[in-house]
Amino acid sequence: MSAQGKGTFPLFDEQRSADIVNARIGADVDPRTRQIAQTVVKHLHAAVKEIEPTHEEWLAAIRFLTDTGRMCTDWRQEFILLSDVLGVSMLVDAINHRRPGAATENTILGPFFVEGVPLSASGANICLDGKGEPLVVQAEVVDIEGHPVQGAVVDVWQTNEDGFYDVQQKGVQPDGNLRGKFQSDAQGRFWFRTVKPREYPIPDDGPVGKLLAKLGRHPNRAAHIHFIIQAPGYETVITHVFAPDCPYLGEDAVFGVKESLVGRFEKIEDPTRARSFAVSSPFWLTAPSFVLQRNNEKRPAKS
Ligand code: BEZ
Ligand code: FE
């Protein structure tokens, strides 16, 4: 038999392993699929050559991925969580949302967004369980030139004082606790009452949690409020406002913190002002400005 074997492809060889595998890709495969497959095989083989795993180690890796898949349900996506803690979710987002400096930056969506939340009037109190320190959010939505964007629809969600989203504690928290949807007015403004967000752990009762523990990493996210801002003609922004005094800002479990997203929170000890917002005193106040770029705005090049 020739060194080529029976077929037209080279036989396996340690040195040229990635090229040998990639040579099997069909001639008619579409170019993007070919590029992705070739790149993944190239880097996977390079990693295996660098690591030189034992059979036991390779089996442990297969078992980890199997467990990760088994953990997935309609409500739990352990592979996305894995991508989150490895910084890949943030990287994919960064590649796809290069924006001019003035525009509000994106960050991670996370698994706890709920579609179809009804619109609330500006000023609504989204905290339905009465726990936590009152926070007033006075927000504006503007374009890159600073003009107000009227009619932007803004989804808002956060954990409660115990560090859980309502959907993680059905029957414990009121449905819709700490979730809202608002619309910006002619000045681009809307406001709502909530509670100061606090740090909380990402779901860590599965293989990803075990991985974090094995790597000496904690599962905590820096305290934040989620926002999605959508307006016709503008690029949708999926972002957070982070509490500036959170000890986990520098070590968020999913790498979601960006300098520009750390809010300014003012503690106000003035009963008259508290009454004007219908909150108890003292309370916190933050005034985020969300800057949208038009759909056709020029994108900065890869840095
Ligand atoms: C969140 O912020 O809700 C979140 C993000 C990534 C993983 C888990 C939770
Ligand atoms: Fe979150």
Image: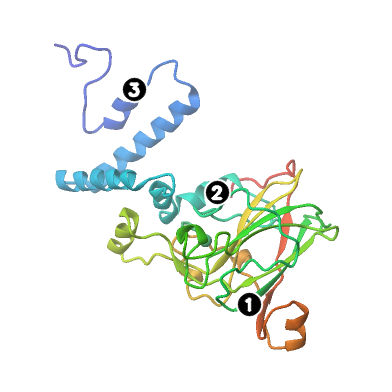
Return the residue at label 3: 23
State which tag comes first along the sequence, 3 or 1: 3
Q: CA distance from mark 2 to mark 1?
A: 32 Å
Label 2–label 3 contact, CB within 8 A: no
**Considering the image in quadrants, where does the N terminus appear?**
top left
Compared to residue 204, the image places residue 37 above or below, namely above
Q: Do the residues bearing badges 3 and 1 touch, measured as CB atoms within 8 Å?
A: no
Indicate the position of residue 254 as horizontal and vertical percent values: 46, 59
The residue to which callout 1 is attached is 134
Which amino acid, mark 2? Asp
**Helix, strand or loop for disc 1:** strand
Q: Residues within 10 Å of mark 2 (few under 14, many from 20)?
A: some
Q: Tell me which amino acid carries mark 3.
A: Ala
The residue identified by callout 2 is 93
Res 120 quadrant in image: bottom right
| Residue drawn at 49 percent across, 52 percent down | 111
Residue depicted at x 28% and y 43%: 66
Q: How far apart are labels 3 and 1 at the CA level?
A: 62 Å
Q: How is the image coloured?
A: rainbow
Residue drawn at x 66%, y 81% is 283
